[in-house]
Image (cartoon, rainbow, N blue to C red):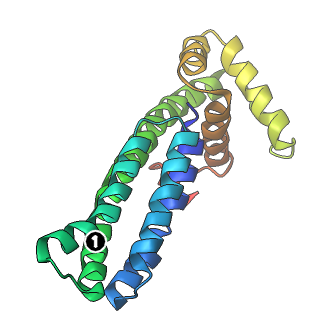
Amino acid sequence: MILCVQIEKLGSQLSKLAQLMDKYQRGEPSFADDALKWLEESEKTISTLRLPEGSEMSALRGRIIKAASVSSNTEGHSTRGAQRLARGAAAAESLERAEAIMRGRLHSSEERLRLFEEKLCEGMTALMLQTPLPEKTLPNMERLKYVWELLREQQSTRPLALYLAASLSPSDRSFILDRVLNRVYNEELGELPSLSEQ
């Protein structure tokens, strides 16, 4: 499971919601159909990430599809306007639920990655007390590889390197190592910035 990819993909999908909700507030007739498309995209994104929440997106789409027929059955001779209102209300509720589900997963991924990043900051401090870091002018990928090898070789940081190797994908390790190194080189060792502010 690549956490940095989860954060990027879920964040990108969630960023489209504001525009959708603007359509709802303006009462645009296409809102429910657009909500269905967004939920379908979200389901595909979640499935690609191999997360279990994909089936919930499918169920939420079903609520919107069902809303118009329920409106017809309960009112007997429901007008198209009433059906559109019912679909719109169901779509708004479904989007609200989908947002909560996806934001929960996004927050969980961000917090997990932040925990590892904080541990790596501590390890980097120990490493810097023992050996100098490579020059900032070294190409980024070479610098990351070199520092990772240093972390694995030094006795004080070897347990951390093993822990990170066992807990994270290579992509996530490179992601947080790059962030920590940038902070070290820029001498910004204060509070960690938000993962969404990269």
Q: Residue furthest front?
A: 76
* Residue 189 can be seen, yes or no: no
In which quadrant of the rendered image does the C terminus lie? Answer: bottom right
Q: Which residue is mark 1?
A: 68
- Position of the N terminus by quadrant: top right
Q: SS of the residue at dot 1?
A: helix
Q: Residue at x 87, y 43 (%)?
A: 139
Left or right side of 89 for 196: right
**Could you say where residue 144 lies in the image, as x and y percent from the top left?**
75, 34
* Apparent side of residue 24 relative to residue 1 in the rendered image (left or right): left
Specify the amino acid type for callout 1.
Ala
Q: Position of residue 117 (x, y in %)?
A: 51, 36
Q: Position of residue 164 (x, y in %)?
A: 56, 21
Locate residue 157, reporting x and y percent. 59, 16
Name which residue lies at 52% across and 60% down. Answer: 13
**Residue at left 44%, top 50%?**
191
Q: Quadrant of residue 61?
A: bottom left
